[in-house]
Amino acid sequence: MNAPTPPCELAGLSVLVTRPAHQSEGLCDLIQAARGRPVRFPALEIRGPADKHAARAELAGASRAAMLIFVSANAVRYAFPLLPDQLPVDIAIAAVGGATARALAEAGLEPTLLPERMDSDGLLALPQLNAVQGQSIYILRGEGGRELLFDTLRERAADVHQVDVYRRQIPQRPAGVANLVRNWPQLVQAVTATSNAILDNLFTLLGEEGAEQLRATPLVVVSQRMAEHAVARGCESVHVANSAQDIDVLLALCEASEDVV
């Protein structure tokens, strides 16, 4: 079967793909199909919780919860082995975004709540998350994530349990990073970053010389909040994809390619 025709072409554009290694192949395949060249440079590693037994104990009460909120596809991947075998048949399952919803569906748990604006603010705007007084709600997230969901739902008088089911870590500095920085103009013409943690790690891994080149390279991010963070770090050409889905990142890359001299 032939691969579908990509919606745009990158005309040989070299793209630094910074997602964790286990999550980058879909985007790399799309870039290649659009006649681009993906350069794999994972700037984030995902690990399970430091204490799985403690996380499993925290999640035991989910068997009586009114709602589970998954903040990312990683939350789905790492929470499922720790959740009780039996969940209430009428439990609400909330996904912050499209990738999270797909991960839930693949795991056999269809999301019942998915915001049109695919972020925490969009989720909190849903009517079902405004009338939550006294409800037991579990937020499944990564260590050190945003507190917006937790704080807002507590203010709305919900019984909120926030459980860290995975950790984000900066990878060891790759052996080839010096060559990447030295040959940056030939190897990297655009960069993708799908979280602030990835972008911050990228600055650290590249070092001072690489950071200066990163700031001058067209950058694709996946939210306005990320764009503001990138600009604050000195990035000069920031493009915002409509979502973190691979196809939306590709479309933003095609737009960013117009900035490449």
Image (spheres, rainbow, N blue to C red):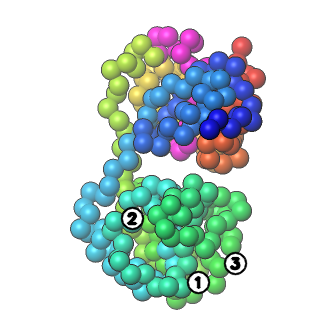
Residue type at mark 1: give it: Val
Occupied quadrant, residue 76: bottom left
Distance CA(mark 3)–CA(mark 1): 9 Å
- Which numbered dot is residue 76? none
Work out whether residue 155 or residue 53 is closer to the camera in this orientation and state it: 53
Q: Residues within 10 Å of mark 3 (few under 14, many from 20)?
A: few
Asked whether 117 falls inside the magenta stretch, the response is no
Residue 186, x across and y down, in percent? 56, 11
Q: Which span is picked out in magenta? A: 181-196
Residue type at mark 2: give it: Ala
Residue 5, x across and y down, in percent? 71, 34
Work out whether residue 104 or residue 19 is closer to the camera in this orientation and state it: 104
The reply to whether residue 234 is visible in this rendering is no
Residue 31, x across and y down, in percent? 61, 30
The reply to whether residue 140 is visible in this rendering is yes
Occupied quadrant, residue 26: top right
Q: Residues within 10 Å of mark 2 (few under 14, many from 20)?
A: many
Earlier residue among tags 3 and 1: 3
Residue type at mark 3: give it: Pro
Residue under label 2, please give it.
Answer: 79
Work out whether residue 261 or residue 4 is closer to the camera in this orientation and state it: 4
